[in-house]
Image (cartoon, helix red, strand yellow):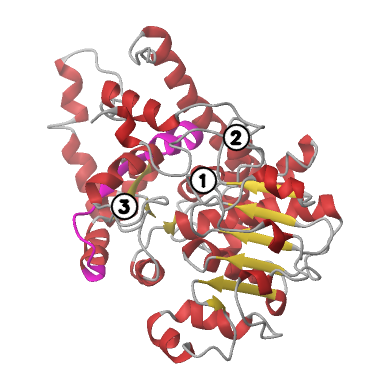
């Protein structure tokens, strides 16, 4: 394939506008992927000095380990790498902003996820794209993998199927199952919103929040915000048909086909605002958009109808629904996007490595919404201690010290809620998470210095 064929509409993968450098990320990604033929590898973690060592790493000695686990299955978390290994599972039905492109095409994304898991959380993650989009088969397959993993990260699964898959697997499995496009994005949104409200002097109970796009990310965000204490009656969700409210004509269909959207239609929009995004934004304090890639999806004139010093998160990838500089032109106070080449990247990469680090360290059986809230609050606190600014409401992925702190907060909450197999103090969890994460980064740096990881090729 020629590099130009990989470019998509809306900028061809280039960063555009006055605040960014002009880099063709698509061309670079394709070139580097061909050179390295994958992003992650598996290497031994035990010393090997000769053939004799395999007598205890493998046969005959390994039989004693198997017999011990046979008597107590939980020993698999102590005697094998299960305690630090997860599966990143997807069916390719909703990949980034690209839609249903299939399992093979989802693999690069799952690999990238595995890379971030290891580098930022010290978590061993195995990418597993499934060659089926049948919900029952997906659930059966994931359940059958339980003995091999300490957790499951669901990825790139379309809505509304992703909601029921998550709920069913959480009920069936005794290891944490997490859907990053739901819980991860919701948690990072909560952390960013906490700090944006601090900067603007707005109170959580008073703000009117509009969530544009009623897919996995925003439905999960609405649910998490409500659990965190925001007023559901002052929230409005907007999907392709318009605002959700208790009198919508398709409410009966939603009850059957999309229970969570039905639930939110009843809980939110107490004033029963009808119409589309333009109507919903009148008098709103906050807009969180996770909808169709732009630009031009959101109009500047709609933003002008919001309250003074509005907060706007435009998170569509690869191109936000409206460019950040357009939002500045109409007086938006705090702006966030899903991209790393703009300030305030609201991306689930800030959440999932730490969440699984904490869940694995505590040997948690699940990840609850209140555990996610604890993680979000710690992420927000990290940025507060650094010093909040309009262009810094949330840590960046380069601030790796935030990840062990978030992990420890989540692990502590797991212990409080009684879902942890292992009990320790927050400081103990923090020390362990810091060491594991630091060692993962050190391993990459050492491999680069020694040439095991080759330097980037010239383009």
Q: Earlier in the sequence, mark 1 or mark 3?
A: 3
Of 210 and 27, nearer the camera is 27
Of 145 and 59, nearer the camera is 145
| Circle 2: element type | helix
Up/down of 258 relative to 130, above or below:
below
- How far is disc 2 from disc 3 in space, using C-alphas? 29 Å
Q: Which residue was labeled with disc 2? A: 431
Q: Which residue was labeled with disc 3? A: 89
The residue drawn where x is 58% and y is 64% is 221
Disc 2 vs disc 3: Cβ atoms closer than 8 Å?
no
Q: Which circle marks residue 373 in the picture?
A: none
Magenta part of the chain: 114-136
| Circle 3: element type | strand
Q: Earlier in the sequence, mark 2 or mark 3?
A: 3
* x then y, percent, for residue 48: 25, 17
Q: Quadrant of the N terminus?
A: top left
Q: Residue furthest right?
A: 201
| Circle 1: element type | loop
* x then y, percent, for residue 444: 43, 21
Q: Earlier in the sequence, mark 1 or mark 2?
A: 1
């Amino acid at each position: 394939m020629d590099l130009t064929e990989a470019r998509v509409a809306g900028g061809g993968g280039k960063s555009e506008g006055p605040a960014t450098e002009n880099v063709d990320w698509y061309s670079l990604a394709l070139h580097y992927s061909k050179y390295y033929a994958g992003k992650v590898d598996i290497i031994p973690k035990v010393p090997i000095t000769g053939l004799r060592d395999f007598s205890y790493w493998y046969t005959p000695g390994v039989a004693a380990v198997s017999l011990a686990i046979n008597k107590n299955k939980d020993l698999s978390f102590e005697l094998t790498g299960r305690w630090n290994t997860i599966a990143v599972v997807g069916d390719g039905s909703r990949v980034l902003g690209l839609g249903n492109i299939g399992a093979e095409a989802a693999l690069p994304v799952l690999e990238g996820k595995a890379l971030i898991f290891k580098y930022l959380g010290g978590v061993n993650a195995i990418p597993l794209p499934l060659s089926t989009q049948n919900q029952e088969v997906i659930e059966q397959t994931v359940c059958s993998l339980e003995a091999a993993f300490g957790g499951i990260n669901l990825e790139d699964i379309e809505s509304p199927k992703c909601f029921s898959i998550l709920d069913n697997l959480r009920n069936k499995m005794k290891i944490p199952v997490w859907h990053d496009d739901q819980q991860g994005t919701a948690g990072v949104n909560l952390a960013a919103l906490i700090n944006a409200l601090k900067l603007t002097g707005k109170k959580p109970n008073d703000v009117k929040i509009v969530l544009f796009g009623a897919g996995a990310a925003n439905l999960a965000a609405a649910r998490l915000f409500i659990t965190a204490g925001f007023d559901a009656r002052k929230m409005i969700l907007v999907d392709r048909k318009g605002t959700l409210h208790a009198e919508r004509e398709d409410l009966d269909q939603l009850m059957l086909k999309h229970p969570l959207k039905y639930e939110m239609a009843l809980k939110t929009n107490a004033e029963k605002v009808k119409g589309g995004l333009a109507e919903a934004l009148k008098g709103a304090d906050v807009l969180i958009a996770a909808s169709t890639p732009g630009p031009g999806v959101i109009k500047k004139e709609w933003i002008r109808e919001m309250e003074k010093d509005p907060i706007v998160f435009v998170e569509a990838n690869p191109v936000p629904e409206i460019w950040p500089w357009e939002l500045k032109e109409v007086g938006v106070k705090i702006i966030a996007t899903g991209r790393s080449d703009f300030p305030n990247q609201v991306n689930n990469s800030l959440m999932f490595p730490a969440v699984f680090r904490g869940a694995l360290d505590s040997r948690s059986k699940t990840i609850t919404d209140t555990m996610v809230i604890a993680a979000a609050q710690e992420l927000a606190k990290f940025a507060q201690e650094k010093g909040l600014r309009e262009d810094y409401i949330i840590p960046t992925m380069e601030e790796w010290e935030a990840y062990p702190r978030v992990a420890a907060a989540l692990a502590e909450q797991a212990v409080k809620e009684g879902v942890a197999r292992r009990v320790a103090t927050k400081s103990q969890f923090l020390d362990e998470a810091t060491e594991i994460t630091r060692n993962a980064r050190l391993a990459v740096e050492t491999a680069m210095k020694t040439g095991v990881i080759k330097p980037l090729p010239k383009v």
